[in-house]
Amino acid sequence: MPFKKYLLLLVLSVSTFIYAQNMQEGFTYLETGKYQEAESFFETILKDYPDNKTAKLCYGRALGLQGASEKAVTIFTDLLKLYPNDFEIKLNYAESLLWDKNYSDAKAFYENLIKEDDKSFPALLGYANSLSNLKIYDDALVYVNKALEVLPGNPNALTSKKYIYLGYAYQNQQAQNYEEAERLLKENLDLFKDDKDTLLNLANLYLIAGEFDNAETTYNTIANTPENKTVALNGLALVKHLKGKEKEALNISEEAYNTISNLNDATLIQQTKERYIQALIWNKKYKDAQVLIDTLHKAEPNENWILALRATLNIYKSDFKKSVADYNRILENDSSSFDGNLGKANALKALGKYDEAYQSAENTLTFYDKQKDATNFITSLNTSFTPFWETKASYSFDNGDNKAFAVQTNIEFPTSTKFKWLARYGYRTTTNKVTNFDATSNDFSLGLAYQILPNITFKGTAGVTSAKANTSNYTQLVTDLALNIKPFKLQVLDIGYKSEIQSFNAELLDREIVMNNLYANYNLSTNFNLGWFTQYFYTWQNDDNARNLLFTSLYYNILAKPALKAGLNYQYITFKNQVPTIYFSPEQFNAAEVFVNIIKDEAITKPKAWFYELTAATGLQYIEDDTSQSTYRIQGKLGYKFTERALLNLYGTRSNIASATAAGFTFNEIGLQFKWYLCEFPGFRE
């Protein structure tokens, strides 16, 4: 070979070596994540060597890894045109599609790469990541495992595998396949022992599934790692709240709050402040919560999480209009906000704006498909407007030898969120063997309820009562007209007119006494657990008698779950005429009692679970100028909810308190009540 050719070959070899050495600096930038430096470095190289394939490839990677995915895709597309058979360029092009979130195209391209080389680690891992982003998690697991067979223990593949498991578990959680989600998360923990992300997902799964003890255990496991303790305390506070242990929730949250000065993670600091304020709200420490919220809001007036806290506080205080205003501001900032959409739905429901509440809840589901809280909200709202049939059968007796058996059926059939039809049928037979009186009555009425305004609802029924007694058979028209008004927050007022037949016993039914009642009920709640209920009836009768009845109750809510309250009741009755041989009609009657009531409401009871109510009261009653008499009253109910659509309860009462009908007696009643929702959801929403 001529000397010149040797010289040229030597120069080229030395140049290539020097050039490669010069590019090593850029390779190091890429390997260490200094992508801006890498971009500048390779951009400079390309000015001198614009056609250099390696420099172009590295420049495209530097751009793509910084987030400039479109530019990266363009660079690799151009390289593919120049080097259509270069496998490395194909791999980088496929990866750029992932950066650009073009997962479908990436999946298709990786499939071809795997056909070319089914042992290529980057192709197998890239394909697994494409499938994972498309939520095809079962296949993603298959291919990430194939990648790990090629390079066992590779950290990138292990990280992908972890997040594939987390995504797969979340997918099952959203579909409410809780057992499968739990299995996947536990499998992930077998691979990544005590992994914080996996444990947090597992704890959240348990919260959603209502397995609060398991959630608590999981958060305690997280707390074993000192740097994760604050995260765990925030979770434990929520668990205690869901268990109804609000004081414990506040104590735990306060412990977490006191660690803020030692935290560097801005997100964790925010979460800790948020949980502490929530715990204050749960414990009705509204002033303390307000001070903290105001301080945060002053510093950051447009932050969604702060606005959400203020909206939550106002919901607890029943300032629903203020809550809606804050939720609207949240949605202006972020239309997909979960707190904004579902929080607004709850506030609108409380305001009686049901159509808008439906819309907000459905908006939530457009962003968070099958989200359980939003789904449960719609289910609960649907229940309020689903037609139902309710039947109650009862047997009563007293020490005056009166016995009665009664059956009553009510049907409600809503045709919109504002309007519903009402129907009622009642049958009652009563006997007294001592007086030889017996009577039977049938009641039938039809009516409607209409929401005039969000805070005013009209309810009206009209019908007939037909009675057969010892000496008379008759039919009387009866009616009940009422307005339910919510004049101000925490206040409810009912005013109405009701006509009815006096039907306590057979003798009274025989006398055909018609009672015309004007009445008002007023209930005042407060934000400090105190409540006051007052009822007034003015009654005039066709036997020329008239009655005034006042009942008032001052009570204190001791617990929220189960609802426990205690208080004082007072009742005052006067009659225009005294006819004691016919019915209890004192010139003056006073009664006072102390009571305690505990209830697990059927409305919040889950299917295949029990609900109950128990009231016990004792006091004194004064009939005209007679000496005081001690009184007692016991009422109880025990029921079972078979499904969301069917429930049954057994109830009973025993009392020696005088009423507008009799005095000096003991009254007992037992009954069975069945309620069945005729459809799965409102007919007008099909």
Image: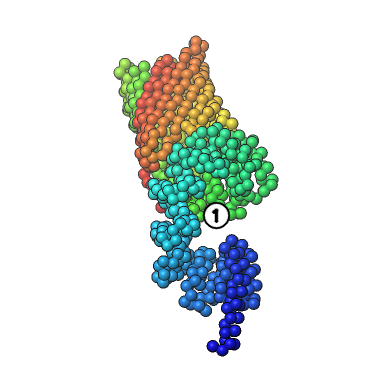
Q: Quadrant of the N terminus?
A: bottom right
> In this rendering, is residue 251 above or below 102?
above
Q: Position of residue 641 (x, y in %)?
A: 38, 37
Q: Position of residue 250 (x, y in %)?
A: 57, 35
Quadrant of residue 442 in the image? top left
Q: Position of residue 228 (x, y in %)?
A: 55, 43
**Residue reaching furthest top?**
627
Q: Say which residue appears at 69% left-offset and 45% top-offset.
A: 298
Nearer the observer, 624 or 103: 103
**Residue reaching furthest bottom?**
2
Q: Residues within 10 Å of mark 1 (few under 14, many from 20)?
A: some
Q: Position of residue 116 (x, y in %)?
A: 41, 72
Name the residue type under label 1: Ser
Q: Is residue 92 visible?
A: yes
Nearer the observer, 329 or 56: 56
670 horizontally vs 363: left or right: left
Element type where label 1 sits in the image: loop
Q: Say which residue appears at 48% left-offset and 24% top-offset.
A: 596
Question: What residue does disc 1 label?
Answer: 336
Q: Say which residue appears at 35% left-offset and 28% top-offset.
A: 671
Quadrant of residue 426 in the image? top left
Q: Say which residue appears at 59% left-offset and 61% top-offset.
A: 33
